[in-house]
Image: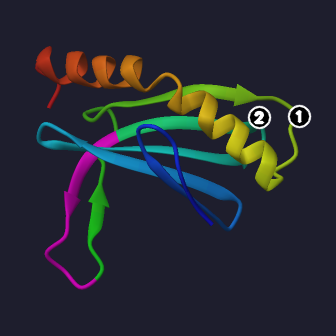
């Protein structure tokens, strides 16, 4: 299922949702999935390489941006709950973009 919000498309697949966009030279992913804390949405920036057959996303721990934006404790990983949690993260898109830009403007990677 692919759905469009006012800013990004997202796809629900195998118990997770992912949205992504380019911001300057970085590619930013916003992902929502279930883990031991509940439903979690995080943003992560890195490099997107589309030169191969499948393309790849590379992220350098401690050098590239990564932050958890939403935690829905004790939530079941139903499609409805995943979408609601992901939309909560997407509602913070302007904050996420500003934080990612500030992270790299400070000289991080």
Residue situated in front as seen by the camera: 16 or 8: 8
Res 106 → quadrant: top left
Does 47 sit left or right of 66 as displayed?
A: left
Q: Residue at x 71, y 60 (%)?
A: 15
Mark 1 residue crowding within 10 angstroms, few (<14) / some (14–19) / many (20+) = few
Does 81 sit left or right of 101 as displayed?
A: right
Instruction: Compare marks 1 and 2 and give the one earlier in the sequence.
Output: 2
- Can residue 6 be seen here? The reply is yes
Residue 17 position in % (x across, y down): 59, 53
Q: On screen, 76 above or below 54?
A: above
The residue at the far front in this view is: 6
Residue 90 position in % (x across, y down): 51, 32
Residue 18 position in % (x across, y down): 51, 52
The secondary structure type at the circle numbered 2 is loop
Q: Which residue is mark 1?
A: 74
Q: On screen, 3 above or below 27?
A: below
Q: Residue at x 40, y 17 (%)?
A: 95
Q: On screen, 68 above or below 11?
A: above
The secondary structure type at the circle numbered 1 is loop
CA gap, disc 1 to disc 2?
7 Å
Res 36 → quadrant: top right
User: What label does residue 100 carry, if any?
Assistant: none
| Magenta region includes residue 87 | no
Residue 81 position in % (x across, y down): 79, 43
For the N terminus, the quadrant is bottom right
Of badges 1 and 2, the one in the foreground is 1
Residue situated in front as seen by the camera: 59 or 97: 97
Q: Which residue is mark 2?
A: 37
Residue situated in front as seen by the camera: 24 or 35: 24
Q: On screen, 55 above or below 15?
A: below
- Can residue 60 be seen here? The reply is no
Does 18 sit left or right of 56 as displayed?
A: right
């Amino acid at each position: 299922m692919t759905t469009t919000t006012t800013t990004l498309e997202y796809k629900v697949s195998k118990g997770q949702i992912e949205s992504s966009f380019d911001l300057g030279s970085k590619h930013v992913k916003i992902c929502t999935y279930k883990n031991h804390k509940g439903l979690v949405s995080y943003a992560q920036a890195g490099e997107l390489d589309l030169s191969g057959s499948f393309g790849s996303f590379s992220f350098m721990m401690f050098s590239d941006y990564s932050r958890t934006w939403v935690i829905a404790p004790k939530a079941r990983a139903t499609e409805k709950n995943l979408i609601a949690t992901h939309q909560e993260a997407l509602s913070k898109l302007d904050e996420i973009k500003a934080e990612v830009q500030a992270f790299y403007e400070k000289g991080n990677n």
